[in-house]
Structure formats: structure tokens, C-alpha cells
Image: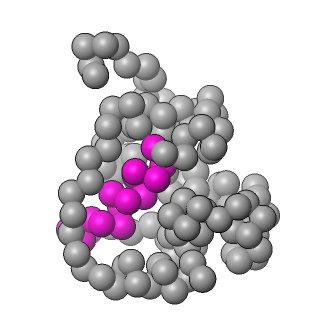
């Protein structure tokens, strides 16, 4: 269950630097803006979630509910119906939890918000 997986992840204090590419950051901002659905941004969201759970040095946390949602949908890759059933929530509620977690993670690590500009040039890659 995602609740047990979350406890293991937060209880294991092992640090690993996870680099999130500019392309993934741009995809995550597109998700926040509503330009890109979860499915199109899933790889970028996955990278952000890995960064969050591998960061033993962080001095902040997402809510327990947000962490469980991220484990169920993003890390375990469960289909929407199984993720919502295990959390006892609707797809809209689960999507909102993921959205809120991505928003907080982007802000804390990179200072990015839904108002941040999108798009990369070749020079930036």
C-alpha cells in the first residue's frame, strides 16, 4: 500500500542529489499552468518526486496526504482508479493533491510558480 511505502521512504534518511533537467522543469510548469495534462508531464513530475523523497537534507515537508498521493500515482504508477480507491478520494481530489505537491516542490527547489515563463531556447539546452 502507498501508506507503507511512504513510511519507508520518509523513514530512510539517505540523501542523493537528483538533477531535474530544464526540459522537465518546463513540463512541470506547463502542468501547473494547465497547458499539459498529468499524462504528458508524468516523467517530469516523477523526477521532482524522486528529488523530494531522496532529499534527506530538506527542512520542509509536503502534507502526509500529498506524499501518499505521490507515492500511489507517481512512484507506484497505479492507474487512476486504483490510486483513488486506495486513497478514498475522487480523481479530481487526487489530481489536486498532485498539483499542490508539484507546485510546492517547484517553488521550494527552483523558485518556479504557475506564473513562471515557459519555453526553452536551444542555447538553454
User: Within the image, what quadrant is residue 41 found in?
Assistant: top right
- Tell me residue 69's x, y (percent): 59, 67
Please check the rendered image and state whether residue 90 is part of the magenta-colored stretch, yes or no.
Answer: no
Which quadrant: the N terminus? bottom right
Residue plotted at (49% across, 45% down) = 43
Q: Above or below — where is 104 with respect to 116?
A: below
Question: 58 or 19: which is nearer to us?
Answer: 19
- Would residue 72 be seen by someone viewing this image from the given angle? yes
Q: Judge whether 1 appears above or below 38 on screen.
A: below
Would you say 62 lies left or right of 18 here?
right
- Is the C terminus in the top left, top right, bottom left or bottom right quadrant? top left
- Quarter where residue 24 is shown: top left
- Could you tell me which residue is drawn at 65 percent across and 55 percent down? 96
Q: Return the x and y of residue 80 as percentages of the image width and height.
A: 73, 60
State whether the magenta stretch is mostly helix, strand or loop.
helix
- Classify residue 25 as left or right of residue 3: left
In depth, the one of 18 and 65 nearer the eye is: 18
| Residue in the picture at 40% in, 84% down | 8
The coloring applied to the image is: one colour
- Residue 58: in sight, yes or no? no
Q: Is residue 118 left or right of residue 108?
A: right
Q: Where in the figure is residue 21, as x and y percent of width and height? A: 32, 37
In the rendered picture of this protein, how many numbered marks are placed on residues? 0
Residue 7, x across and y down, in percent? 44, 85
Say whether residue 55 is magenta: yes
The span picked out in magenta is 44-59
Query: Looking at the image, is 106 positioned above or below residue 70?
Result: above
Above or below, comparing residue 94 to residue 7 in the picture: above
**Residue at (25%, 79%) from the top-left corner?**
13
Taking 42 as reference, is 105 left or right? left
Amino acid at each position: 500500500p502507498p501508506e507503507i511505502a511512504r513510511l519507508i521512504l520518509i523513514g530512510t534518511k539517505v540523501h542523493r542529489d537528483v538533477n531535474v533537467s530544464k526540459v522537465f522543469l518546463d513540463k512541470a510548469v506547463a502542468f501547473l499552468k494547465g497547458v499539459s495534462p498529468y499524462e504528458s508531464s508524468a516523467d517530469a513530475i516523477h523526477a521532482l518526486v524522486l528529488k523530494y523523497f531522496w532529499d534527506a537534507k530538506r527542512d520542509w515537508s509536503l502534507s502526509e496526504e500529498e506524499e501518499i498521493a505521490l507515492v500511489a500515482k507517481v512512484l507506484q504508477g497505479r492507474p487512476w482508479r486504483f490510486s483513488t480507491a486506495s486513497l478514498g478520494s475522487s480523481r479530481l481530489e487526487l489530481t489536486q493533491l498532485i498539483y499542490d505537491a508539484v507546485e510546492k516542490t517547484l517553488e521550494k527547489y527552483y523558485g518556479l510558480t504557475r506564473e513562471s515563463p515557459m519555453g526553452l531556447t536551444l542555447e538553454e539546452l
